[in-house]
Image (cartoon, grey):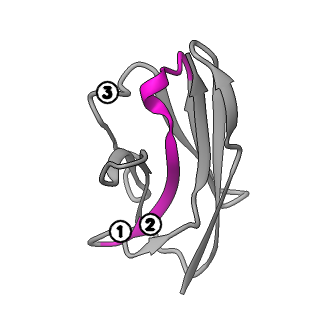
Amino acid sequence: QVQLVESGGGLVQAGGSLRLVCEASGRTFSRFSMGWFRQAPGKEREFVVGLSLSDGRTRYAESVKGRFTISRDSAKNTVSLQMNNLKFEDTAVYYCAAGELSYDYWGQGTQVTVSS
């Protein structure tokens, strides 16, 4: 079993930055991918970024490329999402996810609100 806990959400003005952290505990495997998703009010959950723990490859949604960066701290078993130049449309609940062939494990989510 894998447990994921997100932190770092909050309220920020447009153009500002936030850093989200996902702490993983329990069983994690080198073949896992970890990622961030988000869900805005009235919208479906959408993929933001994914990181392969086996080879370090990343994949970003077009809407966040050049603004968001995912990174990993193996010693702390955390994955972080640095979000710069935030826009009003980035407002959402952000979820950390992990899994091998699919994202089977999810955190509880952390709210990010960007004021215009």
x, y percent for residue 37:
41, 51
Q: In the rendered structure, are the residues bearing label 1 and label 2 in contact, judged by CB atoms less than 8 Å apart?
A: yes
Q: Residue at x 53, y 15 (%)?
A: 85
On residue 42, which mark appears? none
Q: Amino acid under label 3?
A: Ser
For the point 63% across and 17% down, the residue is 16
Mark 3 and mark 2 residues within 8 Å of each other at the beta carbon: no
Q: Which residue is nearer to you in this view: 35 or 40?
A: 40
Q: Quadrant of residue 9?
A: top right
Which residue: 35% across, 24% down?
65
Judge whether residue 13 is colored magenta. no
Of callouts 1 and 2, which one flags the residue occurring earlier in the amino acid sequence? 2
Q: Are marks 1 and 3 in contact (CB under 8 Å)?
A: no
Quarter of the image for the N terminus: give it: bottom right
Identify the residue position indicated by label 2 in the image.
Answer: 98
Q: Secondary structure at mark 1?
A: loop
- The residue carrying mark 1 is 103
Point out which mark residue 63 bears. Answer: 3
Residue lying furthest bottom? 1
Q: Label 3 vs label 2: CA separation?
A: 21 Å
Residue 11 falls left or right of residue 40: right
Q: Which residues are magenta?
A: 84-100
